[in-house]
């Protein structure tokens, strides 16, 4: 009934995503066109977006009468790191692991990757290790 009154979701506006595919964002949002806008749980949708590898922050808003607005802030890649298991990760400046997907799209570092070491981190050169990222596999 609400969608008949013009309150069904007719559009989702995305901004800020360059590395996160639109399809992944739409799937994480979980909204369907025509769904009543009042029933769209924007808080739960934001939480699902924050689980995507490249998403650092997200804002999800209703724009009455029938639009959803999504603004994504993506993580910034800083370095590549080869884990002891041989996987190469894209990492943030703070040492947070982003993803192992699409690593080949990044240029290789000037110096070769060391196993178990992250290149380019100032605190690594002093012998300290970056904090363990919540998504890091065991042993990192």
Image (cartoon, grey):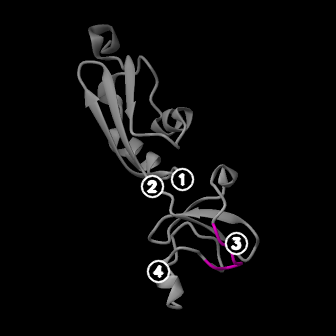
| Foreground tag (1 vs 3) | 3
| Foreground tag (4 vs 2) | 4
Q: Earlier in the sequence, mark 4 or mark 3?
A: 3
Describe the element under mark 2 as helix, strand or loop. loop
Q: Which residues are magenta?
A: 110-117
- Residue 80 versus residue 26: which sits nearer the camera? 80
Q: Are marks 1 and 2 in contact (CB under 8 Å)?
A: yes
Cα–Cα gap, marks 1 and 3:
25 Å
Residue occupied by mark 1: 53
Describe the element under mark 1 as helix, strand or loop. loop
Question: Quarter-wise, where is residue 113 in the image?
Answer: bottom right
Cα–Cα gap, marks 3 and 2:
23 Å
Residue occupied by mark 3: 112
- Sort mark 1 into few (<14), some (14-19) or many (20+) by Cα contacts within 10 Å: some
Residue 4 vs residue 83: left or right? left
Identify the residue at the far bottom of this view. 127
Cα–Cα gap, marks 1 and 2:
8 Å
Cα–Cα gap, marks 4 and 2:
19 Å
């Amino acid at each position: 009934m609400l969608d008949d009154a013009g309150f069904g979701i007719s559009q989702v506006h995305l901004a800020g995503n360059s590395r996160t595919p639109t399809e992944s964002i739409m799937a994480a949002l979980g909204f369907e066109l025509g769904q009543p806008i009042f029933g769209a749980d924007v808080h739960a949708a934001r939480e699902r977006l924050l689980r995507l590898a490249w998403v650092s922050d997200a804002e999800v808003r209703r724009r009455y009468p029938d639009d959803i607005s999504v603004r994504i802030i993506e993580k910034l890649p800083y370095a590549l790191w080869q884990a002891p298991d041989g996987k190469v990760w894209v990492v943030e400046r703070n040492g947070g692991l982003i993803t192992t997907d699409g690593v080949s799209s990044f240029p290789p570092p000037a110096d070769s990757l060391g196993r178990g070491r992250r290149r380019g981190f100032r605190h690594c050169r002093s012998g300290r290790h970056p904090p363990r990222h919540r998504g890091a596999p065991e042993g990192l």
